[in-house]
Amino acid sequence: MKLHFHLIAAIVSALQDIFVDGRYADKVIEHQFKQHPKWGARDRRLFAESVYDIVRWWRWDWHLAGLPDPACLIPAEITPQRVWHVWAAYWVNKGEYLPPFPEVAAFNPSNVAPMSGAKVSPALRASVPDWLFDLGQTELGDQWPSVLASLNEPAEVFLRANELKTTTTDLKKRLATEDIHANQVTGIPSALRLTERKSLFTSAAYREGHFEVQDAASQRIAPFLQVEPGMRVIDACAGAGGKSLHLAALMKNKGKIIAMDVHDWKLKELRRRAGRAGADVIEARLIEDTKAIKRLAGEADRVLLDVPCSGLGVLRRIPDAKWKLSLEEIARLQQVQAEILTSHSRMVKVGGKLVYATCSILPGENNRQVAAFLAANPTAWTLEEELTLLPDNNTGDGFYAARWVRNA
């Protein structure tokens, strides 16, 4: 495969942005695409796939490059020359030949195979931080090896057909006319799975609001809330509104959805997406203080709490998250989750339903949060159902949800 120097240099620059400057991989890739509008589809694909693959396997590729393991996450140690060698190790490990670039002239490809066969810790072999490997073992036990292996696989691309405007059957036919091919997903009526990655956001079907990009497992959360047309629904941690849009479709655009978040920029994106989707029942509200929640006490037929979490269930999609997380951050998030569950649950009316959801695989953020809430409210709530989706035995990412009914 012929490689252009400027493309590999852009990959190295992107990795510097991610591991030295702490920027998010998806934003770095988006920025590079804007900087290089003349890249063709092949270059864009090679760039994005290489960046995500190296981020996913950063610790392992760093080891294959013969670099000292403790330095792989120390910004001062991640020099441009070392990053070039990490890319070289990644490229050779794929079975490719190194190009005659001066930056990799000192790299010895014959060292990669011996480094690959060396005895190392299971955390290094799986390319995760030691603390995360240990936490996964503690929390998931025998399930952890299979879950971890699945989290190191590239993510598939799923679409959610906007049933306010189309159906999965019609959307599949429409996309095929744009050379975007997808298959329906068994058990998830709104979902399509792409057969190969394509540029989606320039699609006419997307611009007209016929679909959103949304993981298949994520598409199981809104139906779990059991909404009906005409209900008053609150999506209290709405973010940019993916699940609010799904709820609007399930409610056939009848009733009221109050989509709330503490970040105004996310709500602006939600309004833009709702306009494109034709979801007229969504009202975006900024949470500026606790009064915003108190005013809605006992008002909602349904409340969705898709709470801030570690995001460990979506590492296939956001591989750089594992390098930015820490045990301290997870502990802080668990405290936030408990506080949100206690305060925001008061918005549910008697006889109404509450769903607590995360995109985490950790029982500490999921089942144990639910158990603690029930222990603190033994008569006020009845737990109806729990949904645990692990990425190794599920279509899509790792998600969790629990649904309660509020008693008198």
Image (cartoon, grey):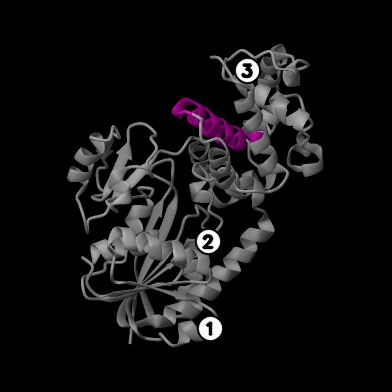
Residue labelled with disc 1: 290
Q: Is residue 398 magenta?
A: no
Crowd rating for badge 2 (residues with CA inside 10 Å; few <14, some 14–19, many 20+): many
Dot in front, 2 or 3: 3
Quadrant housing residue 226: bottom left
Reading the chain from its start, which is encountered first: label 3 or label 1?
Answer: 3
Residue range highlighted in magenta:
40-58
Residue labelled with disc 2: 365
| Callout 3 amino acid | Val
Q: Closest to the observer: 263 or 4?
A: 4
Q: Is residue 154 left or right of residue 310?
A: left
C-beta proximity under 8 Å, tags 2 and 3: no
* x 51%, y 36%: residue: 37
Q: Is residue 378 visible?
A: no
| Residue 234, position as x, y percentages in the image | 37, 74
**Where is the C terminus found, in terms of image quarters?**
bottom left
Residue labelled with disc 3: 92
Q: CA distance from mark 2 to mark 3?
A: 39 Å
Reading the chain from its start, which is encountered first: label 2 or label 1?
Answer: 1
| Residue 167, position as x, y percentages in the image | 19, 50
